[in-house]
Amino acid sequence: MEPVTFTTDDGARLEGEVRTPEAEPRGSAVLCHPHPRHGGSKDHPLLWAIRNDLAATRHLAVLAFNFRGVMGSGGTYGGGRDEVRDVAAAIRAVRERVAQDLPTALIGWSFGANVAVRAAIDDPRVAALALIGLPLVPNDLSLPPLPDVTDLRALRRPVLLLAGENDTFAPSADVEAYAAGFPHATVRIVGGTDHYFWRREREAASIVGGFVEGVLTPA
């Protein structure tokens, strides 16, 4: 695990960690964490599990980072809007560590999923997008609006939407409905768990890893 720092285009200095595979990387991935004002950071067990799966099993270089204002990252919370800049900088940072022509996956959970889908719309470097527990119902998180179906139709890259069966932020029916707006979307609902995937982290990570591997490194 290599600690890294990188700077956004508006001058926020962010902290992260890159985990590289033992073999030559087949690509790269960026992980986006849950809400900064509700305890979210790069160090949640679910994100650790995803990072480990992508690096050890799928042979990707994986960057997990803290959004602006979280722990050692500079700047202040940007309401989910400035954080799109953080994602762009993170993608640039991890791609500097692998060949630029290799594909990059973007993976977000909860608040991070909201930011990730908005970042991916206009970033051609994102070859695949995984959205975990994407908040789709009214809540107290004060998140920016999600892209509408017109924008989603323009995102012609593979997308995974993953949620727990009992996720109150991302009910299964809402996930299925939102997924229908993408040209190429897969939905996976994990039974018997909720938004946090407690004790099911490895299972969720394997689903994300299998999707990314199938998209970025097909047999």
Image (spheres, rainbow, N blue to C red):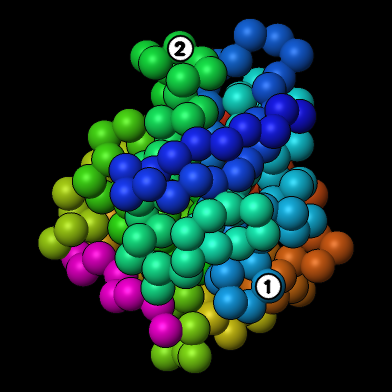
Secondary structure type for disc 1? loop
| Residue pictured at 31% horizontal, 58% vertical | 118
Pick the quarter of the image with the C terminus. Answer: top right
The three-letter code of the residue at mark 1 reads Gly
In which quadrant of the rendered view does residue 158 lie?
top left
Tell me which secondary structure the magenta stretch mostly adopts. loop
| Residue pictured at 67% horizontal, 59% vertical | 71
Give the side of residue 215 with respect to residue 194, left or right.
Answer: left
Give the side of residue 130 with respect to residue 119, left or right.
Answer: right
**Residue 99 image label:** 2
User: Closer to the camera: disc 2 or disc 1?
Assistant: 1
The three-letter code of the residue at mark 2 reads Ala
Is residue 179 among what the camera can see? no
125 shown above or below 84: above
Residue 171 in picture, x, y percent from top left: 52, 80
Circle 2 residues within 10 Å: few <14, some 14–19, many ≥20: few
- Residue 24: in magenta span: no
- Residue 146: in magenta span: yes
CA distance separating discs 2 and 1: 34 Å
117 shown above or below 146: above
Where are the magenta residues, as a range?
Answer: 142-149
Secondary structure type for disc 2? loop
Earlier sequence position, callout 2 versus callout 1: 1
Residue 69 in picture, x, y percent from top left: 54, 63
Q: In the displayed image of the protein, which residue is found farthest to the right?
A: 199
**Residue 39 image label:** 1
In which quadrant of the rendered view does residue 37 lie?
bottom right
**Residue 199 image label:** none
Give the side of residue 200 with respect to residue 64, left or right.
Answer: right
Is residue 149 among what the camera can see? yes
